[in-house]
Image: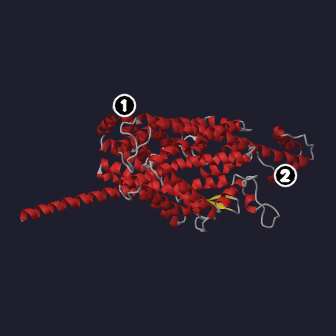
Amino acid sequence: MCLTHTWDNPMQFVLACVSYAVGLGNVWRFPYLCQMHGGGGFLIPYMLMLVLLGVPLFYMELAIGQKMRLGSIGAWRAISPYLGGVGMASVVTSMYLCLYYNVINAWSFWYLFHSFQSVLPWAECPVNSNLTGPVEECERATPTQYFFYRETLDISGSIEENGGIHMGQALCLLLAWIIVYLFIVKGVKSTGKVVYFTATFPYLVLIIYLIRGVTLHGAINGVKYMFTPKMEQLAKPTTWINAATQIFFSLGLGFGSLIAFASYNQYNNNFEKQAIVVSMVNSSTSIFASIVTFSIYGFKATFNYESCLERVRLLLLNTFDLAEDTISLENVNHWIAELNRTHPEQFASLGGRLETCDLEAELDTAVEGTGLAFIVYSEAIKNMPVSQLWSVLYFIMLLLLGMGSMLGNVIAVITPLSDLKFISVLSYLVGLVCLFCLLLGLGFTTRSGNYWFTMFNDYGATFSLLFIVLIEVITVCYIYGIKRFEKDVEDMLGHRLNWYWKIMLAGVSPILLIALFIFYIVNYIQGGTPTYQAWNKELGKSVVTEYPPYAQAFIGLLLASSVCCIPLTALYTYCKKRNLASGKRERTVSTVSA
């Protein structure tokens, strides 16, 4: 361990795990998957994968950390000198995550600071330089899209168009890293205090948002949409695969954070109970956050739908010279059919001006990631009464969720480096890691930075984490040995592994991981040239664009760099042992000759 300190009490450890596991993915990834894969029907594969994959692997990582009382590199090296590369791969992957994840916190700071205005800046389009009307790019898009892509990111047209650093974003990123440093600088003594706030306050905000959300006009449409199961989605393999990957990444497996957290536990701490509790809290939070999200989503969809109906109503009233109270929002569709029947030629002249308003289509529009967190939510917030208050609450919640996860990410890097005695003074080591990540992270604040952010988000962790955890579970069950692992558990907890843990760890979980790993490789190969969403300011929307050759080469480097640590470290250890053995033989021969 990097310090002789342990958690003050088991609750601190549980809250640290909750703060780490419950992150931005619970707010923006899970609701998107529900929307994509049949609403409430998605909960069936999700809960199954939690039981078959998530909880057993979470349990295994906590057990390894608590038994070895070392970071990821030291823990796996203690099991076998050839497996130090597993820990190194975890450190490299966590470092990639640290580089870009704090950029999201910087965006949250940016939106939070802009929330203290009489009119939210994403509520309406700014006036152009001639003061003759709104900015054209904003008119083509929406005010919320314009604020995110132009004001927040000042995004370029493609990854190949570079530009200078956005100073506002760079300062927000600096602030985010200063806060992370202060949270971690004294090890678990400071982190243990911080998690009381980062793990609990987001729930208070979610509860407040739930109360507000369900009282919004049209919220029920979103909640009904979420809980209406489309069982035909269960026949699609992608539904089950996405359920498994969501469980896998939501719990933070493979990064080394859980091993690092558990290394600060008392030796006889009941990690078995804690693994189940944290896993259940994490999944319950995803479902809870989805209800909040879909209530707000229903409000936004209903608002857009009724705005569309109002535009159609006014168009019909003006075109056919009808009395103001003739057409209402409730009977617009009836009048469209009626006027088409009675005045076909005049109705035909409307052409493309007549919009098609469909509430279901509005609800079907699936958005994930930053699009949901910073565009869809912002659009809903701007239409709420006292929108500034709801904006401040929402972005504080995002910040705390992001910061809680960042603590785990940085500790996953700090703890193994401390074990290696890289730098003896912890505050210096934390400072160096934070400074290194800040300097490299500034690249994400350039005009093309968001495209590199997307690349790291899509390719920096997925492949490597699947491989790392697959090696971990095979190592524990078939190299270290399930019986030896069982004795370690008995030594710590006072009882042996029950049949559930044995069957999951030795059979079901490895098979599922191998299936996921194969699917990822096949899907990557069949996907053809990797693409990304490039912002086109002329169209006011994102367009699918292929990555240039150098970016594709960088993607290959991201995929391979962390995974390569495992075979290369094993090869280095083998060669080192072989050289030592041959050196001993030579000394023995020379002694005998003498």
Q: Secondary structure at mark 2?
A: loop
Kindly report which numbered mark, 1 or 2, lies closer to the viewer in this rendering: 1
Mark 2 residue crowding within 10 angstroms, few (<14) / some (14–19) / many (20+):
few
Q: Can you give x and y, in whole percent of width and height, for residue 430 in the image?
A: 46, 56
Q: Quadrant of residue 10?
A: top left
Out of 154 and 519, give the one closest to the viewer: 154
| For residue 129, side relative to residue 544 (left or right) | right
Q: Are marks 1 and 2 in contact (CB under 8 Å)?
A: no
Under mark 2, the amino acid is Leu
Out of 380 and 500, give the one closest to the viewer: 380
| For residue 323, side relative to residue 586 (left or right) | right
Q: Can you give x and y, in whole percent of width and height, for residue 552 in the image?
A: 50, 63
Q: Which mark is residue 498?
A: 1
Q: Residue at x 14, y 63 (%)?
A: 586
Q: Closer to the N terminus: mark 1 or mark 2?
A: 2
Q: Is residue 531 visible?
A: no
Under mark 1, the amino acid is Asn
The residue pinned by badge 2 equals: 350
Q: Secondary structure at mark 1?
A: loop
| For residue 106, side relative to residue 99 (left or right) | right
| For residue 62, side relative to residue 458 (left or right) | left
